[in-house]
Each structure stands twice: as C-alpha cells, then as structure tokens.
Amino acid sequence: MRFHDTIVLSLSAVTVLALAGCSTVSTPTDGGALSASAPARQEGEKAPVSALLSSAALSKRLLEESDLGEGYARKPQQPERHDDVMVSGCPALDKLDGAAAVGGSLAFPRKAKASFTYAGGRDSEVVEELYSGTEDNLSKGVGRVFEAMTSCPLYQVLVGATPVTVTTQRLPAPKLGEERWSQLLTFIAGGHSSVVKQTAVRTGTVVVVVSGSAALVDDDLAKAVDKADSAL
C-alpha cells in the first residue's frame, strides 16, 4: 500500500493531517518545548510584519526555487483531498470537531502555499504555507491545533478505507519570530511508515508553516521566515 507521493502536513483549525505518499525519513532524537518566547529584538533587526496581507501579497513572499538553491523543483498545486476521516484515541482532536482533515489548511482566508521536491534525497519534499491574520487570532489558532496534535502521543485515523496510526512528538523550534511551534509526526499504514517534521513561526500578522523532510525543514525555515518578513 502507498500513500500519495509523500506525507505532507497542512495545519487546519480542525486538525493537521494530510495524506500523501510513503517514504521513510530519519527521525531527530531531541525533544523539546512546544513553543518558546522570542528573544529580545536586537538593534537593526527587522520588525515583524504588522499589517494584514492579502493572499496575493502572501504569494509574493513564498519561497521560490532561486531562494532555495540547486536541487529544488516546484510542484504544481494539487486539489485538496476531501476524504472521510475518523479519529480515535485522541480526545483533544475530538474537541476540534474530531475529523482529522486530510490536506486541510488553517482556517484563515488570507493564505498562500508552495510545494517543492528536492533531488538531493530520495522522495524528499518540503511545503511552505503562509497565513495572515490578527496577531491574537493567529496565536490562538495555530497554538490550539499544535497543542491538540501533540497532546496525543499515539492515535489512529481512518482516512476513507485506509487505517493510519499516528505518533506525535513535540520538538524545540528555532528562535525565529515572536512565537513558534514544532512537531514530528510518524504515520504508519500498510506496513509502511513516513515521518514529517512541521514547524510554524509567527512574525507579527503572518504565520509561516514549513512541513516535510526534517532536514529540508531545518534548512529552509529561516529562509521562509526571512522572506515572509521582507517588505516587497
């Protein structure tokens, strides 16, 4: 049995699950806090985005192949999947309406998304999502979803007719932006497993979410936050 391409996560106000392919990625061994307060801003350091941005404005702040370097290729956007989803073994997700939406996005209307493959690693993939909203709404919305996901170290999901076991682990996030969240998710189905790292950073009225191969997320997160913070 195969998932579709690679498991890639998209946060959702209801949940954070997306099903997409089967590959095995090495798993970091360090755990850590769900989020941490940002360090004091140094003199000359760029201020976070303070105005709400339209989806069109956000799309201009997405990473491009030229930002990422050799080996990256942008993927065409795929239509969102709308499989019937049932979650068991995670009361926190039930409180978020229970349906671990596959391929969903955060419930903010101002958003943009880009997906890339990387030729330097087998089936390596990274996805960037940008959202804009008020600082309070972004903080509460993203925090609530990450907290719900990581509150259950092990649970089961039925996506259509496919049973999937999910394990979650909180990870330390780099000291970027004003708030940040990070997690590692392992998906097991049909004897195959796939590991996805996902990190979100809020900088003012913009949230940057980078998901995919752990190594690629680590390499590309700061680039994504820096470009999202840039005045165009």
Image (cartoon, rainbow, N blue to C red):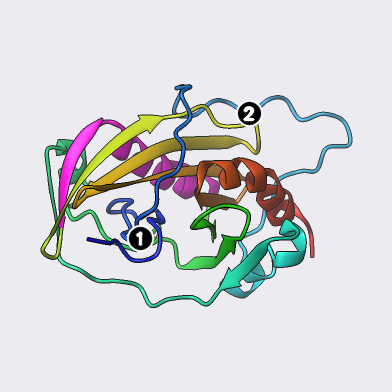
Quarter of the image containing the C terminus?
bottom right
For marks 2 and 1 on the same chain, the one whose residue lies earlier in the sequence: 1
Question: In the picture, residue 165 is in which quadrant?
Answer: top left
Q: Position of residue 92 (x, y in %)?
A: 20, 38
* Camera-nearest residue between 98 and 41: 98
Q: CA distance from mark 2 to mark 1?
A: 35 Å
Left or right for 219, reference 79: right
Question: In the picture, residue 150 is in which quadrant?
Answer: top left
The residue depicted at 47 percent of the width and 44 percent of the height is 198
Q: Position of residue 134 (x, y in %)?
A: 53, 52
Q: Position of residue 7 (x, y in %)?
A: 37, 55
Left or right for 116, reference 142: right
Left or right for 198, reference 151: right
The residue depicted at 52 percent of the width and 57 percent of the height is 125
Question: In the picture, residue 31 is in which quadrant?
Answer: top left
Q: Which mark is residue 21?
A: 1
Magenta stretch in the rendered image: 135-158
Q: Position of residue 127 (x, y in %)?
A: 52, 58
* Camera-nearest residue between 186 and 52: 186
- Label 1 amino acid? Gly
* Camera-nearest residue between 41 and 193: 193
